[in-house]
Image (cartoon, rainbow, N blue to C red):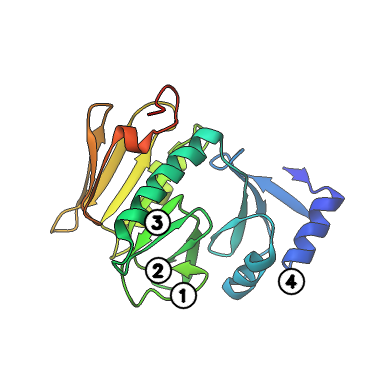
Amino acid sequence: MRECGEEAAVALQRTFRTIICNMSIYSPLRNNHIMELATAFISVPDYLQGEETSHIRHEYLGGQIFAMSGGSEEHNRIAGNIYTSLLAHLRGSGCKTFIADMKVKIPIAQNTASLFYYPDVMVTCDPQDTEKYYKTRPCLIVEVLSPTTQNLDRREKRLYYQSLPSLQEYVLVSQEEMLVEVYRPNEAGNWSFDILGSQDSLELQSVGLTLTMADIFHCWGSITG
């Protein structure tokens, strides 16, 4: 536990008008990538209003916010490769593809609370998914793993994402090796996963697109062609 610096306190007060930040708590699950936790309870409307003008993205967990830092070059290249492939493939289909700055809302505790995450890449094909600043019915979510967030992505986020009835695939992509994990529900609603290596292709059944590892990892490491 450590005290906020004056500049951090002023910034939070300016961004979230109803919050007085006296201290920050650093979460072991979110160090480096998702850093600060404001201790004051924040309502969903205040959170959404603050995010519209904040220069820092925050994820929202039932009244508390976590400030997010930026990703590495590899992280951005991999996410960008997947995003551009999906964008080209889905153009004219009615599906919408988002990268990094679009939130997904997840109701919890029998709809008495909510979570908001920022997936690295997300696709929604539901015409009723019309909120401007967040989506509620994604069919595909992709997260690019990093050493500091991989446990969060594999555990907490995966379980919450899997609670979304619309979600058909959850994909985790390593930025350190050519490795992809794909989670899918079966007809009974039970989730299973596949691990793909350098010689495999990623079949995104939710959107009818197949990506080679070269597509995903283009301009990563020694892959430039």
Amino acid type, mark 1: Glu
Q: Position of residue 105 (x, y in %)?
A: 45, 66
Residue matched to label 3: 122
Residue 172 vs 43, above or below: the answer is above
Amino acid type, mark 4: Thr
Q: Nearer the viewer, mark 4 or mark 1?
A: 1
Q: Nearer the viewer, mark 2 or mark 1?
A: 1
Q: Quadrant of the N terminus?
A: top right
In this rendering, position of residue 76 left or right of residue 13: left
Label 2: state its secondary structure. loop
> Of the residues under marks 1 and 3, which one precedes in the sequence?
3
In this rendering, position of residue 40 left or right of residue 218: right
Say which residue appears at 27% left-offset and 43% top-offset. Answer: 182
Q: Nearer the viewer, mark 2 or mark 3?
A: 3
> Of the residues under marks 4 and 3, which one precedes in the sequence?
4
Q: Nearer the viewer, mark 4 or mark 3?
A: 3
Amino acid type, mark 2: Thr
Tag 2–tag 3 contact (CB < 8 Å):
no
Q: CA distance from mark 2 to mark 3?
A: 11 Å
Residue matched to label 2: 136
- Would you call the spot at circle 4 few (<14 residues within 10 Å), some (14-19), or many (20 or more)? some
